Image (spheres, rainbow, N blue to C red):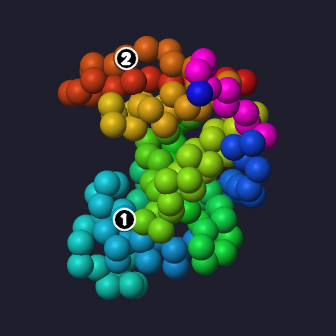
Amino acid sequence: MKGKKKWRLTKTLSRRIEVRPIENEDLKYAWAAYKMRGLAEIGMPAGLAADQFKREFESFILSRTHAAWTTLGETKKGFLPIGFGLGNWGPAERFIIMSAVIWLPWASCRNVLEGTIGFFNVMRKQLPIIVFTHEQHKPLYEICCMHGIMHRIGTSHSMGEKMAVFEARK
């Protein structure tokens, strides 16, 4: 196949993807992910019992983020949460900076791709979003750019490492 690959939003999002604010019923999926070490990247301490985890996770969401969403998608076990998006307001509360995008351990590569594109496609229509991403995750956001829902706005070196910076297109 020669030439430039054509990415189509309708094709990528042909399976159902849903994005909604995080709810109490999502806690059981967060607990399952925690037991599989899927929440280690946000600093959840290891070895918590279920009730301790509930308190710790709720405290984290309420005190360290301004907004939290759940992305649901088709998995082998049905239509389930496949990831969480956590954001904080930027200066003057004009845009959201994504502080974490967490993909749950049972999310396949296809779920991650569809979920990322679905999440940012929905959210870009609601509010401006900026994403700082590590080099290993940069190709995923470049695919969002190829779909026309994001564009790269630069590189940041101020967080102790080189990070690509992307902005969701309105």
Secondary structure beneath disc 2? strand
- 24 and 155: which is toward the camera: 155
Residues rendered magenta in the picture: 2-10
Residue 53: quarter of image: bottom left
Outermost residue to the front: 1
Asked if residue 129 lies left or right of residue 106, the reply is: right
Rendered view: 3 above or below 113? above
Q: Residue at x 39, y 24 (%)?
A: 164
Q: Quadrant for the C terminus, please.
A: top right
At label 2, counting other C-alpha atoms closer than 10 Å, the crowd grade (few under 14, some 14-19, many 20 or more) is few
Can residue 141 be found in the magenta stretch?
no
**Circle number at residue 53:** none
Q: Which residue is mark 1?
A: 38
Rendered view: 49 above or below 2? below
Instruction: Decide if residue 66 is in sight here.
Output: no
Q: Which residue is mark 2?
A: 155
Label 2 amino acid? Thr
